[in-house]
Image: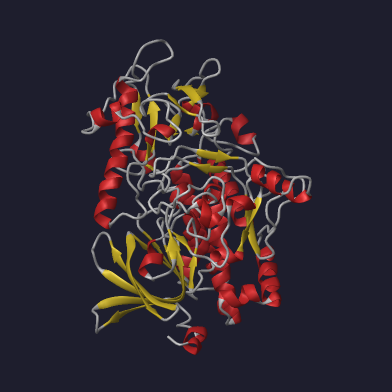
């Protein structure tokens, strides 16, 4: 495809037809979003809002990624109810609460709370059941599905890509159910795959794992680069507790291994992984937690039951819920023995199986051997909730991925751009010490601690205070390829800076910005690189973002977290 053909575009609507030569179906559209996770969903919605015809693929039957199929209640910053996200993300949060008020038997007290938190979990102000998010997210897509502007391919994964010079021509996807293939041709391809798979298929320059300190000048980076040192993954699961009942599952095949497994990390872990004593992320000192199903833990113990609770029965009419429902995404079910990002397809299947076995082993350990606050052992009343995750076993549909393959970008976000302590050291006595790096090409904002879970390379938690930061357009631009844009955790970050850009509202902002960028580039018949380099185009693009509810800078009153 030459430049003139690329800029003049493909058919105005998504078209499905038969390629007689290849014997495969073809789809043609303006924007193809490969991956329907948090960023991919937001990217598709953004492109649709800007008048594009979109094909969206998703490997499960739930869009939303970490919000839904990966079963991770939203991790958000302190100011999320007031500012610090895009308008569409705030709309999503509002509609989740409205859905509960309309469809659930809330108590009058819960119904009257403007900031209703269905689970009253301590990790978030909006811990809730994943089916609600699915309903809300899908409802926003319905008008575009009805109009024919959107085609969603559920249970589809990318298999290959064709390129011509610096342009991606097509992506072939395969149905996980029928094994049939479809060829997608688009003006722009947005990689929203959880592991950055499309980057590899399209030959986009990328990095994995941890960069060396010499390369990035980051104080938390290792001395030697390790391409396989990605953060561990987790197979989350939902559970409740029915007192007096026995729901003990069959002993997992690998239980004895996990029961006796002691992590070999640097700095050292606290002992066995299957224990309520684990490392405090920020200090690496031992912390002991308790689990008190449907109750409150005593003393200074950390309350794991309430941590990611997604349904607090006190919010609902008596008898509506036999138990609270909590979500297990704890240090004890992080899997870091093998790297999922760089693994082959066969290795990935094995790794995900091991991660599932770890989670089931943790659950079985809690049912049979975990210490109880009353001095006894085991909680046989714990019950997996497959109805909550829409699976057969109660584990999430997909493994929770914290870190992806990342583009080599025109601009890379570094630890020293937002680490509070590093900024104090670099700019002591200057106003620059109190704020993150200012990016003139900002396409959004985010804030979370630089929070890295233990990595495959053997590094323990890295958890550092972070200043509220901007997301630069340059981090969404590959150094060479023109019409592929990253739309989730695969932007120009490092292993370290990814620790604060991987959370729900930031991934949403990244995806939404990617969808808006592709749409603006098509409308202006300019490549994204030209938009960043041309002051007038950049100004107009940023103005269009603001008009759509993006926030491009933080209020001066916010502080580090």
List x then y, in percent, for residue 132.
47, 45
**Foreground of the two, 153 or 216:** 216
Q: Residue furthest top?
A: 375
Can you say whether 31 is above or below 58 in the image?
below
Can you say whether 448 is above or below 38 in the image?
above
At x 71%, y 43%, the residue is 559
**Foreground of the two, 380 or 465:** 465
278 left or right of 505?
Answer: left
Residue 145 appears in which quarter of the rendering?
bottom left
84 left or right of 519?
Answer: right
| Residue 312 visible in this rendered orientation of the protein | no
Can you say whether 433 is above or below 491 in the image?
above
**Foreground of the two, 330 or 187:** 330
**Foreground of the two, 4 or 477:** 477
Image quadrant containing the N terminus: bottom left
- Give the image's coloring scheme: secondary structure
Residue 206 appears in which quarter of the rendering?
bottom left
List x then y, in percent, for residue 231.
43, 45
List x then y, in percent, for residue 225.
44, 52
Image quadrant containing the C terminus: top right
List x then y, in percent, for residue 560.
68, 42
316 left or right of 175?
Answer: right
At x 49%, y 86%, the residue is 3
């Amino acid at each position: 495809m030459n430049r003139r053909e690329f800029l003049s575009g493909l058919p105005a609507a998504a078209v499905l037809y038969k390629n007689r030569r290849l014997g495969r179906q073809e789809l043609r559209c303006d924007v193809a979003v490969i991956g329907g996770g948090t960023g991919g969903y937001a990217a598709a919605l953004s492109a649709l809002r800007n008048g594009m015809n979109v094909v969206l693929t998703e490997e499960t039957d739930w869009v939303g990624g970490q919000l839904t199929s990966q079963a991770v209640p939203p991790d958000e910053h302190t100011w999320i109810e007031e500012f610090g996200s895009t308008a569409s993300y705030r709309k999503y949060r509002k509609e989740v609460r409205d859905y509960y008020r309309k469809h659930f038997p809330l108590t009058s007290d819960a119904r009257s709370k403007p900031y209703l938190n269905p689970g009253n979990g301590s990790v978030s102000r909006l811990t809730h059941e994943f089916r609600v998010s699915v309903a809300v997210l899908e409802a926003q897509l319905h008008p575009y599905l009805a109009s024919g502007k959107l085609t969603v391919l559920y249970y589809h994964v990318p298999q290959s890509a064709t390129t011509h010079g610096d342009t991606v021509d097509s992506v072939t996807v395969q149905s996980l159910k029928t094994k049939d293939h479809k060829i997608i041709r688009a003006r722009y391809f947005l990689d929203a795959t959880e592991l950055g798979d499309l980057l590899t298929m399209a030959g986009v320059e990328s990095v994995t794992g941890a960069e060396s300190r010499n390369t990035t000048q980051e104080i938390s980076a290792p001395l030697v680069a390790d391409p396989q040192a990605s953060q561990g993954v987790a197979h989350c699961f939902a559970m409740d507790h029915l007192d007096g009942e026995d729901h003990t599952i069959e002993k997992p095949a690998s239980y004895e291994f996990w029961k006796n497994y002691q992590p070999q990390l640097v700095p050292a872990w606290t002992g066995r992984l299957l224990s309520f004593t684990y490392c405090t992320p920020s200090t690496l000192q031992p912390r002991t937690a308790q689990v008190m199903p449907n109750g409150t833990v005593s003393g200074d113990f950390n309350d794991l039951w309430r941590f990611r609770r997604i349904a607090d029965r006190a919010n609902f009419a008596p008898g509506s819920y036999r138990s609270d429902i909590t979500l297990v995404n704890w240090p004890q079910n992080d899997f870091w023995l093998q790297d999922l990002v760089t693994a082959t397809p066969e290795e990935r299947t094995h790794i995900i199986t091991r991660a599932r076995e770890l989670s089931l082993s943790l659950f079985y350990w809690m049912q049979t051997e975990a210490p109880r606050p009353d001095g006894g052992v085991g909680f046989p009343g714990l019950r997996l909730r497959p109805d909550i995750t829409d699976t057969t076993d109660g584990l999430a549909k997909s493994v929770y991925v914290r870190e992806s393959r990342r583009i080599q970008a025109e601009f890379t976000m570094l630890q020293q751009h937002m680490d509070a302590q590093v900024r104090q050291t670099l700019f002591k006595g200057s106003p620059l010490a109190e704020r993150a790096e200012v990016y003139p090409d900002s396409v959004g904002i985010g804030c979370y601690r630089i929070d890295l879970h233990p990595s495959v390379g053997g590094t323990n938690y890295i958890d550092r205070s972070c200043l509220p930061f901007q997301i630069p357009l340059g981090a969404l631009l590959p150094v060479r390829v023109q019409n592929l844009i990253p739309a989730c955790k695969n932007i120009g970050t490092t292993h370290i800076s990814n620790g604060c850009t991987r959370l729900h509202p930031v991934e949403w902002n990244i995806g939404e910005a990617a969808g808006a960028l592709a749409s603006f580039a098509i409308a202006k018949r300019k490549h994204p690189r030209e938009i960043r380099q041309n002051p007038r185009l950049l100004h107009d693009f940023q103005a269009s973002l603001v008009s759509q509810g993006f926030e491009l800078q933080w209020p001066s009153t916010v502080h580090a977290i």
